[in-house]
Image (tube, rainbow, N blue to C red):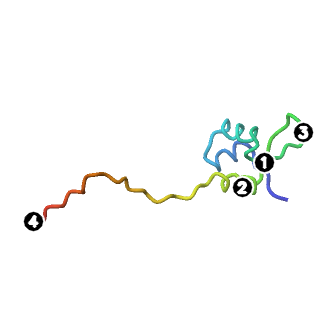
């Protein structure tokens, strides 16, 4: 069984506030464990990893804007 992580610890691991974590939990973006209704909420390491993977985006190459001007040539001494 995985170690259960508290809301405060999970927010610190993800680098977000507890309010943001609660909003993600309430909207179904992150899975959680709650044994009793209105009881303490816990997260697992795998649920945090899934959340990170879901919202990680690959870097895109820079697209150079085409203009009508040509770049300046550097002056050589």
* Mark toward the start of the polypeptide (2 vs 3): 3
**Of 31 and 13, which appears nearest the observer?**
31
Q: CA distance from mark 2 to mark 4?
A: 56 Å
Element class at badge 1: loop
Q: Position of residue 42 (x, y in %)?
A: 79, 46
Residue at 52%, 58% in the rendered image: 59
**Of 56 and 10, which appears nearest the observer?**
56
Q: Nearer the viewer, mark 4 or mark 3?
A: 4
Q: Is residue 32 above or below residue 50?
A: above
* Mark toward the start of the polypeptide (1 vs 4): 1
Q: CA distance from mark 2 to mark 3?
A: 24 Å
Residue on which disc 1 sits = 31
Residue on which disc 2 sits = 50
> Around disc 4, counting alpha carbons within 10 Å, would you say few (fewer than 14), some (14 to 19), or many (20 or more)?
few
Q: Name the quadrant of the N terminus.
A: bottom right
Q: Nearer the viewer, mark 2 or mark 4?
A: 4
In this image, 16 relative to 44: left or right? left
Q: Nearer the viewer, mark 2 or mark 3?
A: 2
Residue on which disc 3 sits = 36
**Of 43 and 24, which appears nearest the observer?**
24
* Mark toward the start of the polypeptide (2 vs 4): 2
* Mark toward the start of the polypeptide (4 vs 3): 3
In this image, 72 relative to 48: left or right? left
Q: Position of residue 30 (x, y in %)?
A: 74, 47
Are the two marked residues, 2 and 3, in contact with CB atoms closer than 8 angstroms? no
* Mark toward the start of the polypeptide (1 vs 2): 1
Q: CA distance from mark 1 to mark 4?
A: 64 Å
Element class at badge 3: loop
Are the two marked residues, 1 and 2, in contact with CB atoms closer than 8 angstroms? yes
Are the two marked residues, 1 and 3, in contact with CB atoms closer than 8 angstroms? no
């Amino acid at each position: 069984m995985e170690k259960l992580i508290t809301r405060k610890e999970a927010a610190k691991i993800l680098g977000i506030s507890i309010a943001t974590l609660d909003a993600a939990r309430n909207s179904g973006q992150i899975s959680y464990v709650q044994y009793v209704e209105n009881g303490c909420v816990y997260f697992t390491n795998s649920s945090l990893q899934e959340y990170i993977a879901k919202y990680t985006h690959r870097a895109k190459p820079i697209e150079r804007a085409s203009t009508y001007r040509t770049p300046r040539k550097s002056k050589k001494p």
